[in-house]
Image (cartoon, rainbow, N blue to C red):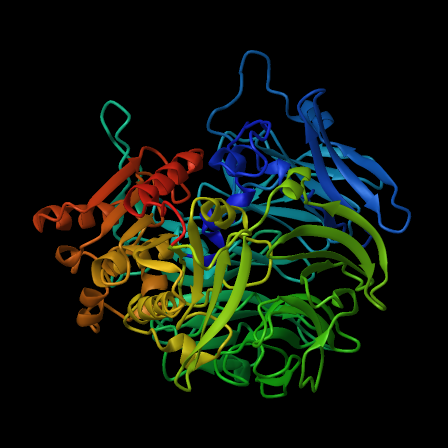
């Protein structure tokens, strides 16, 4: 249940496939069709550019239907000249099917986790690439103009990785790890022994979803070896997703460990790219519950070229241990350890090489607990990592954007603890305070960036909560803007009087502050009586009250035009205020968070312009869980709610996410019982609408059905429910229908006031 993956929270970026932009019927009064079928008129998608490795160029895939076109395009950031690098359609001739055979339905390239399949992957040199064409792989050398088909297969592939030296491409197929040389030769299978339950270099469902895995294979720096993950699911229970449209109603069976169930048994092996036996890394006894990260540490001098580093976690996810494989005897002991006595540790990013015998590591425990700090870890003679902090204590350092091994300076993303505005900052040894990057000097706008691999240029995107993104290129050294390359603002936005945000805080003892944002219509009149709708997520480590366009003001504006204010609240459990604030929710997910939502509502009610009988709440995924809890546990505050894809009983959700925050069901039976909306179904006095996709492989529709059954058993009639056939966690393709029902539910049960008081 990853926070950034909740699709509905980015509703201004959602458009049904094939939808056409439609004229704006009344530019001053928004409709749901405006938000979901005509959103480009208000906020267009900025073209996605990425840095070409080793070049001062941005690249993207440019496609159009009429006339047909698919080309890899490059933009020279200094001159602004755009040129075609490669005609991707021309590569299709290399994978044409034999006459009469037709397209093989079973062939294709699959994505990892929720990520879609790649179109193009660059070699580190930036002079060659691997393209996915009709389900096979094609190598294109842009320097020589040569092109070669790498695979010919009728089986799906996934997890494609190019070796650092560009000599080989690895991929998974039929649960085995394969490799193929870029210039000549047929693919070679590197691993054997896989089955339906044993996966070599192939990921299951739970590791990508809850540990953020994007690959199960990692090339050594010299391109001669591959470390890979082996997952044994033999003891993992299965769950069959309902598929009720086919004649027999037989759905797909998936391996899904629910809270308290056995996890996949995991180990890490290293195999030569040329083929040979796998060497398994000793991860200690007893075997660890999880492998959370795998990377490589470069050697120095007479040492081996590199050593694999494997970071493991215990089942409680309170201890992270890093071990180096195949080093001297001393290196078999843990090289690093992060642990916390209470709460949990969030899975860190993949370790990044930081020169010889050193990596970059993000830790939550090395400075003020609960704040993430980037560190440089250097191996000493005993095989242990010595740490140097590169970012200030008490600041949640987020994504690493660039690191210079020579100076040990880095560029990273962060949101200051006393701000709602994310920015880009500079760090290095001895950093004690935030230093904003020069191209992010406008503190009024949230800033994100991508930095080229030389650290010379930054692709910068700025926005705030009422200003759509703008993208430009700047020089890193002085922040000079070279050119603007994208502006998401649509012409129709100028005709809309956007809702106005107000920010506030409510102290919670000495623990921290409830942060809230209230959206009021542009014509707000404190003499009127408004309804209040709380938009909630609230999951551990999340943060809604940020000053970026991300979720946009469009839906709050629509609701404001219909007589509602919108409130968003970051309470206990959310990020940015340290471990004590975040870990306060441990073992009782959804209870303290709900109290903080109610506290914020009651604070707004004291102002007199909100009708206490017209307070609603809605959310998706964890937010849906919160909405269910609000209606079943705090009916004194919330009169109506809409829950989309909610967890209604934490025993029904997966091991890694649930146990990180709740512990094992056998050790916390009261917590699991008390946090379940099913337990409290008979107490609901308001009106709840629950919507769920029957094909949801993340939060199973079983959650909604169990809650419905509890309502029926309690003879509680204050609920409605909607199940969407085939649709997954994002209820894909019918988002407009979801929001039509959501809006109708609130307008029916929290009707707008007729006139000012």
As drawn, the residue found furthest toward the top would be 100
Q: Is residue 507 left or right of residue 172?
A: left
Q: Residue at x 29, y 54 (%)?
A: 647
Q: Position of residue 41 (x, y in %)?
A: 63, 36
Report the front residue among 739 and 732: 739
The percent position of residue 624, horizontal first and vertical second, equals: 34, 53
Q: Nearer the viewer, residue 168 or 552?
A: 552
- 345 relative to 170, above or below: below
* Figure check: 25 above or below 194: above
The residue lying at 14 percent from left, 49 percent from top is 711
Q: Quadrant of the N terminus?
A: bottom left
> Between 701 and 470, which is closer to the camera in this rendering?
470
Determine whether, in the image, residue 317 is placed left or right of residue 397: left
Left/right placement of residue 281 relative to residue 287 reads: right
Please state the horizontal and vertical placement of residue 378, each as a whole percent of the image: 65, 81
Instruction: Give the vertical position of 735 relative to 556 (above or below).
Output: above
Q: Measuring 85% from the left and 68% from the top, which residue is drawn there? A: 478
Please indicate whether residue 73 sits to the left or right of residue 604 in the image.
right
């Amino acid at each position: 249940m990853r926070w950034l993956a909740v699709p509905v929270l980015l509703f201004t970026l959602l458009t049904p496939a094939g939808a056409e932009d439609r004229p704006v019927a009344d530019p001053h009064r928004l409709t749901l069709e405006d938000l979901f079928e005509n959103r480009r008129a208000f906020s267009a998608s900025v073209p996605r550019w990425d840095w070409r490795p080793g070049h001062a160029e941005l690249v993207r895939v440019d496609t159009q239907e009429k006339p047909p076109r698919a080309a890899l395009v490059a933009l020279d950031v200094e001159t602004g000249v755009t040129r075609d690098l490669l005609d991707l359609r021309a590569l299709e001739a290399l994978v044409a099917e034999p006459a009469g055979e037709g397209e093989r339905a079973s062939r294709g390239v699959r994505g990892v986790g929720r990520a879609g399949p790649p179109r193009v992957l660059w070699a580190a040199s930036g002079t060659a690439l691997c393209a996915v064409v009709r389900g096979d792989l094609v190598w294109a050398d842009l320097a020589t103009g040569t092109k070669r088909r790498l695979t010919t297969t009728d089986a799906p592939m996934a997890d494609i990785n190019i070796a650092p030296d560009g000599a080989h491409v690895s991929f998974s197929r039929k649960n085995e790890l394969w490799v193929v040389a870029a210039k000549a030769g047929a693919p070679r299978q590197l691993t054997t022994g896989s089955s339906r339950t044993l996966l070599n270099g192939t990921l299951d469902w739970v590791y990508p979803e809850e540990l953020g895995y994007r690959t199960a294979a990692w090339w050594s720096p010299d391109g001669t070896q591959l470390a890979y993950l082996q997952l044994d699911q033999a003891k993992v229970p299965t769950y069959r997703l309902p598929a009720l449209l086919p004649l027999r109603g037989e759905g797909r069976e998936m391996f899904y460990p629910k809270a308290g169930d056995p996890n996949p048994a995991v180990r890490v092996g290293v195999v030569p790219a040329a083929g040979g036996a796998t060497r398994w890394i000793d991860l200690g006894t007893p075997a660890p519950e999880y492998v959370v990260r795998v990377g490589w540490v470069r050697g120095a001098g007479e040492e081996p070229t590199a050593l694999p580093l494997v970071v493991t976690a215990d089942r409680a996810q309170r201890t992270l241990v890093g071990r180096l494989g195949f080093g001297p005897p001393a290196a078999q002991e843990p090289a690093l350890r992060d642990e916390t006595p209470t709460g949990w540790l969030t899975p860190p990013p993949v370790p990044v090489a930081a020169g010889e015998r050193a990596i970059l590591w993000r830790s939550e425990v090395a400075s003020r607990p609960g704040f993430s700090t980037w560190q440089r870890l250097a191996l000493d003679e005993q095989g242990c990592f010595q740490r140097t902090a590169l970012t200030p204590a008490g600041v949640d350092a987020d994504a690493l954007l660039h690191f210079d091994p020579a100076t040990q300076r880095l560029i990273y993303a962060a949101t200051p603890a006393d701000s709602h505005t994310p920015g880009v900052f500079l760090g290095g040894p001895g950093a004690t305070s935030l230093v904003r990057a020069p191209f992010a000097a406008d503190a009024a706008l949230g800033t994100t960036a991508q930095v080229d691999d030389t650290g010379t240029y930054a692709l910068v995107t700025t926005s705030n909560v009422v200003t759509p993104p703008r993208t430009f290129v700047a020089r890193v050294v002085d922040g000079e803007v070279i050119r603007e390359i994208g502006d998401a603002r649509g012409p129709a936005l100028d005709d809309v009087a956007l809702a106005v945000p107000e920010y506030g805080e409510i102290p919670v003892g000495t623990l921290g502050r409830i942060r809230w944002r209230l959206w009021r219509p542009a014509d707000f009149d404190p003499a009127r009586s408004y309804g209040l709708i709380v938009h909630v997520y609230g999951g551990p480590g999340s943060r809604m009250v940020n000053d970026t366009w991300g979720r946009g003001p469009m839906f709050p504006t629509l609701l404001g035009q219909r007589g509602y204010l919108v409130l968003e609240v970051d309470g206990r459990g959310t990020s940015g205020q340290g471990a004590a604030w975040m870990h306060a929710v441990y073992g009782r997910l959804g209870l303290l968070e709900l109290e903080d939502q109610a506290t914020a509502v009651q604070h707004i009610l004291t102002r007199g312009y909100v009708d206490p009988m017209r307070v609603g709440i809605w959310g998706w995924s964890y937010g849906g869980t919160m909405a269910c809890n609000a209606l079943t546990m705090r009916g004194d505050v919330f009169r109506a709610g809409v829950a989309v894809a909610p967890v209604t009983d934490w025993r029904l959700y997966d091991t890694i996410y649930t146990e990180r925050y709740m512990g094992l069901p056998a050790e916390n039976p009261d917590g699991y019982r008390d946090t379940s909306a099913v337990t409290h179904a008979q107490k609901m006095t308001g009106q709840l609408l629950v919507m769920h996709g029957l094909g949801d492989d993340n939060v199973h529709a079983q959650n909604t059905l169990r809650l419905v059954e509890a309502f029926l058993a309690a003879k509680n009639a204050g609920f409605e429910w909607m199940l969407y056939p085939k649709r997954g966690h994002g209820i894909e393709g019918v988002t407009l229908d979801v929001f039509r029902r959501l809006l109708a539910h609130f307008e029916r049960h929290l009707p707008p006031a007729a006139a000012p008081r």
